[in-house]
């Protein structure tokens, strides 16, 4: 998966997150939707982390394909 693919995936997740959040303020979410929102948030954290790793590897002359998706607990709520 290249950087362009990661960004496109992030864009899709962001759109889904916005939709779920909008619905949550209007009608509330059922349990499955709340679980999906949480999953989307975690996947976004992981994708942003992966993108940061790839860019750092590239910046320092290394192969960006060495970047790996890290466990949710490692990247969740990460702030740069």
Image (cartoon, rainbow, N blue to C red):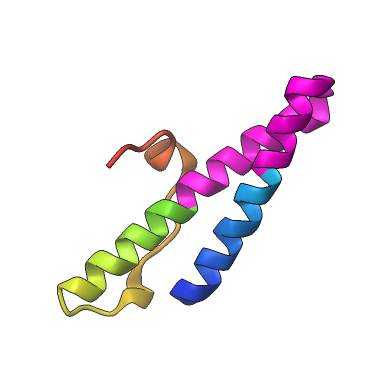
Image location (x, y in percent) of residue 59: 19, 72
At x 34% / y 72%, what residue is drawn?
A: 66
Report how many numbered discs are placed on residues in the image.
0
Where does the C terminus fall, quadrant-wise?
top left
79 vs 12, left or right, is: left
Q: Is residue 35 visible?
A: no
Q: Is residue 71 visible?
A: yes
Q: Is residue 63 above or below residue 24?
A: below
80 vs 78, left or right, is: left
> Is residue 62 magenta-colored?
no
Image location (x, y in percent) of residue 22: 72, 31
At x 80% / y 22%, what residue is drawn?
A: 26
Image location (x, y in percent) of residue 28: 80, 19
39 vs 26, left or right, is: left
Residue furthest to the left in view is 60
At x 38% / y 76%, what residue is drawn?
A: 65
| Residue range of the region highlighted in magenta in the rendering | 17-46
At x 64% / y 39%, what residue is drawn?
A: 39
> Is residue 23 magenta-colored?
yes
Q: Is residue 30 above or below residue 53?
A: above
Image quarter of residue 27: top right
Which residue is more in the foreground, 12 or 75?
A: 12
66 vs 18, left or right, is: left
Magenta region, mostly helix, strand or loop?
A: helix
Which residue is more in the foreground, 57 or 13?
A: 13
């Amino acid at each position: 998966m290249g950087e362009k693919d990661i960004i496109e995936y992030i864009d899709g997740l962001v759109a889904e997150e916005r939709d779920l959040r909008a619905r949550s303020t209007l009608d509330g979410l059922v349990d499955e939707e709340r679980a999906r929102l949480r999953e989307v948030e975690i996947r976004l954290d992981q994708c942003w982390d992966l993108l940061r790793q790839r860019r750092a590897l590239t910046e320092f002359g290394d192969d960006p394909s060495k970047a790996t998706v890290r466990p949710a607990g490692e990247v969740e709520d990460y702030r740069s």
